[in-house]
Image: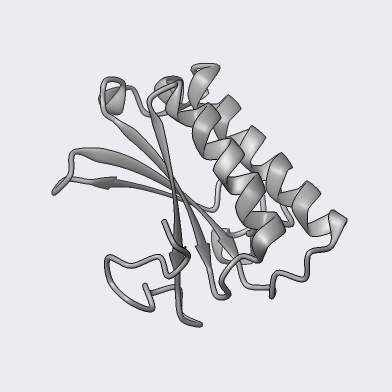
Amino acid sequence: MVPENLTPKGVAHPGVLDAFAYDSRRDTLVLAMYETRPWDGGEHQLYQLQEKLNAYASFILDGEMVDSFPQYADRPVEIQLRSRHEPNEVAMRLLDQAREQLELQQIRLEVILVDAEGDPASPGQCGCGH
């Protein structure tokens, strides 16, 4: 088993849950994914983002999340894309489509700009028009 701090994380690794937290203030489960690379509009990065979103949605909708964390079974869920760089127009279109689909399942999708340490660049602001 690879130590947690050495486990590859980020959009480039769709099979990894980057972060999982319970936000008691909002009574919400937060599943976060990270992207440290600039959004270059390349197909490969968009494909990786789509795969990561699909993996997170499957984790939630297929019951794996409830199996792993039954104490949170009835809590609202939010997926966060925590990015160092503002997604470009092509990535935002993909995220908007994903947001629409996830909302049908009562899952929120948020984009949060973060600094190099992963902290929000502007608390409460995604900086991406959403």
Report the residue at 59% width, 47% height from top. 95
Residue most toward the top?
Answer: 62
Q: Residue furthest bottom?
A: 116
User: In the rendered image of this protein, does residue 25 appear above or below residue 42?
Assistant: above
Quadrant holding the C terminus: bottom left
Residue 11 seen in render: no
Q: Is residue 73 above or below residue 82?
A: above
Res. 77 in view = yes
Residue 6, relative to residue 70: is it above or below? below
Instruction: Say whether residue 62 is left or right of residue 123.
Output: right
| Image location of residue 110, percent across then percent down | 43, 51
Total labels: the figure holds 0
Q: Position of residue 10 (x, y in %)?
A: 64, 59
Q: Is residue 84 found left or right of 14 in the rendered image?
A: left
| Viewer-nearest residue: 39 or 120 | 39
Q: Residue at coordinates 27% horizontally, 65% vertically from top-left?
A: 124
* Residue 47: image location, x then y, percent: 80, 47
Residue drawn 50% across and 30% down?
Answer: 102
Quadrant in the picture for residue 101: top right
Residue lying furthest left in this view? 25
Eyeballing the image, is 115 above or below 30?
below
Relative horizontal placement of residue 104, taking residue 36 as reference (left or right): left
- Residue 77 locus on image (x, y percent): 36, 34
